[in-house]
Image (cartoon, helix red, strand yellow):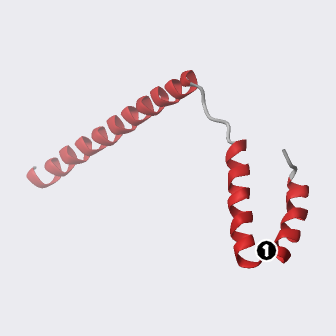
Amino acid sequence: MSTSTASTRGSADEKSKGGFFGQIVLFIRQVIDELRKVVRPTRDELTSYTIALVVFLAILMAYVVGLDQLLVHLVDWVFAG
């Protein structure tokens, strides 16, 4: 695996050699190198993240629904009263 300094030096060499298509190939290589560095969550981590997201969204939805109902009753009280 190369360090960012080495890949920077290599990119300057390859830019001068390859021209336009060399830059495209260099870009694709760099994208592949970066994708190899990605750390994917395990099944347990993904499950816990999903549960946390669903719980958070349920709480947020309950808050918005409660606020909406409060405003509906407030508007009804002001204009019907």
In this picture, is 23 found above or below 6? below
Task: Residue 36: give x, y in percent of width and height.
Answer: 70, 43
In this picture, is 35 found above or below 17? above
Q: Is residue 62 left or right of residue 21?
A: left
In this picture, is 64 found above or below 22? above
* Crowd class of label 1 (few under 14; some 14 to 19; many from 20; radius 10 Å): few
Label 1: state its secondary structure.
helix
> Looking at the image, which is closer to me, 34 or 58?
34
In this picture, is 34 found above or below 56? below
Task: Residue 34: give x, y in percent of width and height.
Answer: 71, 50
Q: Residue at x 29, y 38 (%)?
A: 66
Q: Is residue 19 left or right of residue 5?
A: left
> Looking at the image, which is closer to me, 74 or 6?
6
Q: Name the quadrant containing residue 69.
A: top left
Q: Name the quadrant containing residue 28.
A: bottom right
Q: Residue at x 88, y 63 (%)?
A: 10
Q: Is residue 79 left or right of residue 20?
A: left
> Looking at the image, which is closer to me, 3 or 61?
3
Callout 1, which amino acid? Gly
Task: Residue 6: give x, y in percent of width and height.
Answer: 90, 56
Q: Quadrant of the N terminus?
A: top right
Q: Residue at x 34, y 38 (%)?
A: 61
Task: Residue 11: give x, y in percent of width and height.
Answer: 83, 66
The residue where tag 1 is placed is: 18
> Looking at the image, which is closer to me, 33 or 42?
33
